[in-house]
Amino acid sequence: MLNKEEAIELIERLRPCLPIDRFSLDKECADQAVLYDEVSSVGAEARSAARKSKEALELIKARLGLNIRGNPEAFNLSKISENAISSTILIQDEYQKALQAYLDIEEISSALDAFLKSIETRKSMLREEVNLFVFRYYAEENKKPVSCQQLTDSAEKAITDLRKNDIHNAEKDKED
């Protein structure tokens, strides 16, 4: 399991992979799966560690509660009440260390989840970029429907231009 510094390092190392190069969509699509896999597997590991850490915290809390009830004098309690037991549990070093470990791993898990959401957003953006590319690729920009009359006029002009060119070339040949 990653510690906090390693998780930050992983996120910072992979953050430059988030922008999409529109001119290399094939590479970006291939890299997306690798990026998602790397972060999701570490994120799943962090979520599992957070659950285990929370269970460990609950076990420490239960054990301390039993110890306090069994020997309140060892914890400087003169009177036993649920509020006194709960408060005493919260100030024990063992509980504080376990709580801090849980909060640290929960923070790592949350950061990786947030980064994973960024990667999922990247996936959606990548899909849209591919769609835009495909639509631009097949789109025939600046081509308006042409009427039969326009085609006829265009053909007649081309024929007239060719005839003029032929006449001009023939006159040139006579001169030579």
Image: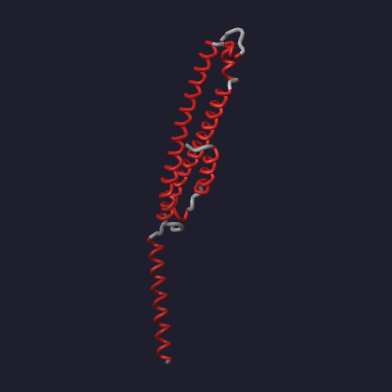
Q: Is residue 75 left or right of residue 62?
A: right
| Image quarter of the C terminus | bottom left
Expressed as whole percent of the image width and height from the top left, the position of residue 155 reads: 38, 68
How many numbered discs?
0
Residue drawn at (42%, 53%), measured in percent from left and top? 27
Residue drawn at (40%, 55%), measured in percent from left and top? 138
Expressed as whole percent of the image width and height from the top left, the position of residue 56 reads: 48, 24
Is the residue 95 above or below the residue 176 in the image? above
Q: Work out whether residue 112 or residue 80 is closer to the camera in this orientation and state it.
A: 80
Q: Is residue 157 left or right of residue 108?
A: left
Is the residue 6 above or below the residue 27 in the image? above
Q: Is residue 33 left or right of residue 63?
A: left
Q: Work out whether residue 108 or residue 155 is closer to the camera in this orientation and state it.
A: 108
Residue drawn at (42%, 42%), measured in percent from left and top? 37
Is the residue 82 above or below the residue 55 in the image? above
Expressed as whole percent of the image width and height from the top left, the position of residue 168 reads: 43, 83
